[in-house]
Image: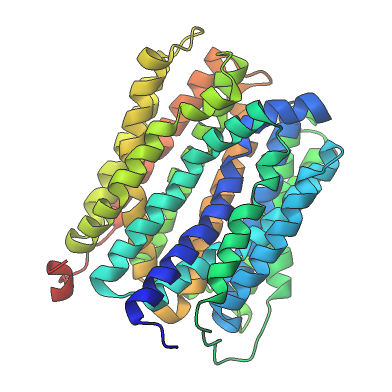
Amino acid sequence: MTRSSTDTQRLVLVVAVLASFIAFLDGTVINVALPAITRELGGGISTQQWVVDAYLITLGGIILLAGSLSDTFGRKRVLLWGLVGFAAASVLCAVAPNAPFLIGARALQGIAGALLVPSSLALIFSTFSGAGQARAIGTWTAWTSTAFIAGPLIGGLLVDLVSWRLVFAINIVPIVLTLILLARLPGDRAGDAAPRVDVIGAVLGVLGVALPVFALIEQVNFGWGSPIILVPLIVGLLSFAVFIWHENLVKAPMMPLSLFRVRNFWVGNVATTLIYAALSLGTFLLAVFLQQVGGYSATLAGLALLPVSILSIALSTVIGRLAGRFGPRLFMCIGPIIAGIGFFVMLRIDASVAYSSQVLPGVIIFGLGLTITVAPLTSAILGAIEPGRAGIASAVNNAISRVAGLVAIAAASIIVGPVLDVDGFHRAVIVTGILLVGGGIISGIGIQNPVSVPADKLQA
């Protein structure tokens, strides 16, 4: 039986949204579960940072390789590998008997998660074109961006009503659904070139990310002068430098540096670095602050960011369509600046942590700015690259966003100090706001709109 083009496009979009949502959700659903995890398994803020960053380290380190695998072996096959691996790692997280086991399982989860996002976006870019592509990216953005914000709410409900372990076990439900839908998709054609895996690049990339992050997290325990901190920091930075050099020489790089010759791609990724560092730092500390200082339950801490999800679902598709028609530059400029203002408004929060008067106004402004930003950002970056390299382009952008997020979280203890109090939270709010405003300014200066708008977009 032949499936119509429209039906196939709808199915592709649903699969892409579900697969990416699973990966993104697990990066944020953990935030409100951290106090409950450390109460049961032990550890302080460094353990909390590692539970978050173990996932982001492997996801950020492997996602570039995953993009190359997607372009080489086919999107559908790589998605299948990722979904099965994510299910297995989720079960390990759910049954973790201690903190080191959980951190290791989270690292495995990150490897599997890295296989999901590049293939998902590459599926969209290879299936949609013109105005339809802009709308599809808007829809994808609405739901996957919601994962960043809905995660704390879902996690809070599960922690308060059952156990933090269900935060991981619940992944099996959407994974099974995605596997069923994936089986209905027609097979995609793998790349023409013989499969080449940049193993050296993958190892250097992981070392270049993981070791400096280790130093950032553990410096509060050992001090910057300790060899336990200095050696990993130096080796990690050298590994990253060698990684860049290696990628410029190898025939089949997992991060083709030629992508960065495209203006919108490199400018968009600089903006991505600042915006996603702010997003990760701000939402991570807000979720913990509301519980540890404000006395909120895990569920209420998750509900605090619900307005952002509502705004994203309501407006992202519209914003994606408008960006497809008028170009992404204006949206990428004003969106992050508005989001940054939202965090500056949170400087009004004091020890009472009153939600309606102190937290909610900033959350609403932040949510509006984030919604204006994300769909145009994705379209500008990936739309600048030819469809045949959509997988690796998506992987590079996602790797940059995840690495920016994990470095920001790793640096949290430097910003707030050993104990998260009102003053430390205010410092984090200021840093978050500055990063967001910086991302908007860079986008306004550097992003270029298309010279001419195709007719099919004018008719959208």
Image x and y of residue 441, in percent: 31, 44
Image x and y of residue 76, in percent: 56, 76
Q: Residue at x 48, y 12 (%)?
A: 353
The vertical placement of 405 against 302, above or below, is: below
Instruction: Return the residue nearer the eye: 161 or 120.
Output: 161
Which residue is farthest right?
Answer: 97
Q: Quadrant of residue 358?
A: top left
Which residue is farthest top?
Answer: 352
Image check: 107 left or right of 248? right
Instruction: Return the residue nearer the eye: 82 or 328.
Output: 82
Q: Identify the image quadrant of the N terminus.
A: bottom left
Image check: 222 left or right of 87? right
Q: Residue at x 44, y 48 (%)?
A: 145
Q: Identify the image quadrant of the C terminus.
A: bottom left
The vertical placement of 335 against 412, above or below, is: below
Q: Residue at x 69, y 40 (%)?
A: 166
Which residue is farthest front?
Answer: 1
The vertical placement of 44 against 155, above or below, is: above
Q: Residue at x 69, y 67 (%)?
A: 202
Image check: 9 left or right of 172? left
